[in-house]
Amino acid sequence: MKYIRWNEELSVDNPIIDEQHKELFRTINEFYTAIAEKKNKLATQKAIEEMENYIKTHFTSEEIMMKNAGYEGLDQHLNEHQFYIDKVQDLRERYEQGRLILSLEVTNFIKDWITNHIMVTDQKYKGKI
Ligand SMILES: [Fe+2]
């Protein structure tokens, strides 16, 4: 698994969210590039921060749409978002403090989790928000 790519199978039939997912993948790919190309700490840190910020921006806007639509699966969905935010935050903090060596295992976790989340959990609100 290398770069993460958006495809029609991942569509949630909401053009705003689909566009945000594509942008999210772009920030994840930048993070992957920083590790694969062994960029320096500052550049890598910047890539993590951008990814983390965009994850938060995207999750917030998805959550607002679910709330506005009265989506019944909101609580479970929020828990999943929080889990991922905590993971990424922890990863950034440990990296900043020199307590974490970034590897492809880390990027694979980031990519696999979000792909699975979009394919399973996000698909549940398809047509509802
Ligand atoms: Fe989501």
Image: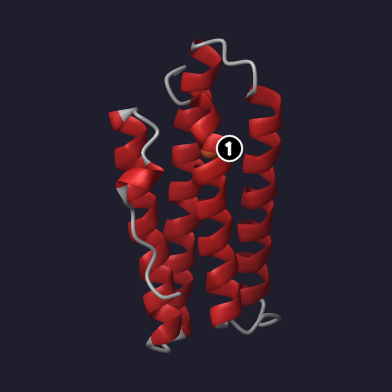
Q: How did the renderer colour the structure?
A: secondary structure
Viewport quadrant of the N terminus: bottom left
Q: Is residue 45 visible?
A: yes
SS under mark 1: helix
Provide residue 47's location: percent of width, then percent of height: 42, 67
**119 and 38: which is toward the camera:** 119
The residue that appears at 37% across and 45% down in the rendered structure is: 9
Q: Is mark 1 within 8 Å of ligand 1?
A: yes
Q: On screen, 26 above or below 127?
A: below
The residue that appears at 49% across and 48% down in the rendered structure is: 55
The residue that appears at 40% across and 33% down in the rendered structure is: 12
Provide residue 27's location: percent of width, then percent of height: 38, 60
The residue that appears at 33% across and 53% down in the rendered structure is: 6
Q: Amino acid at mark 1?
A: Thr
Q: Is residue 39 visible?
A: no
Q: Residue under circle 1?
A: 121
Residue furthest to the front: 9
**126 and 51: which is toward the camera:** 126
29 horizontally vs 116: left or right: left
Q: Residues within 10 Å of mark 1 (few under 14, many from 20)?
A: some
**35 and 108: which is toward the camera:** 108
